[in-house]
Amino acid sequence: MFIAAQKVGPTGRAIGVDMTPEMLGKARANIAAFTKRTGLSNVESGWARSSIFRSRTGAWTW
């Protein structure tokens, strides 16, 4: 997500989806550190259950 944020620059967005509240908390802390280090504020993370995502083959690589 952070590499994507740097590639799209300040006019783009990088969005991550976390599967647990704990992961979301860690992501938000990392986002704050990234913003402080780079000056970019184009990253966000949200929470969603993995069961809402579908793939064409029914398989996922985690």
Image (tube, helix red, strand yellow):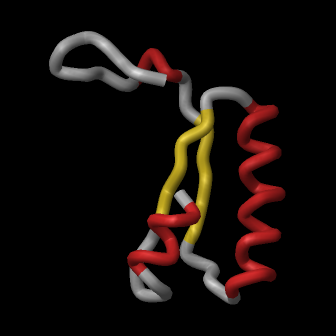
Q: Residue at x 49, y 87 (%)?
A: 10
Q: Quadrant of residue 49?
A: top right
Q: Would you say 7 lies left or right of 54 here?
A: right
Position of residue 60 relative to residue 29, above or below, is: above
Position of residue 5 relative to residue 22, above or below, is: below
Q: Residue at x 77, y 81 (%)?
A: 37
Q: Nearer the viewer, residue 49 or 8?
A: 8
Q: Nearer the viewer, residue 62 or 49?
A: 62
Position of residue 55 relative to residue 15, above or below, is: above
Position of residue 59 relative to residue 50, above or below, is: above
Tell me how many marks there are.
0
Q: Residue at x 40, y 21 (%)?
A: 61
Tell me residue 6's x, y (percent): 50, 76
Tell me residue 22's x, y (percent): 81, 33
Report the residue that reaches farthest toward the left: 56
Q: Would you say 60 lies left or right of 23 here?
A: left
Q: Residue at x 30, y 13 (%)?
A: 59
Q: Quadrant of residue 13?
A: bottom left
Q: Would you say 3 lies left or right of 38 here?
A: left
Tell me residue 33's x, y (percent): 81, 70
Q: Would you say 49 lies left or right of 24 here?
A: left
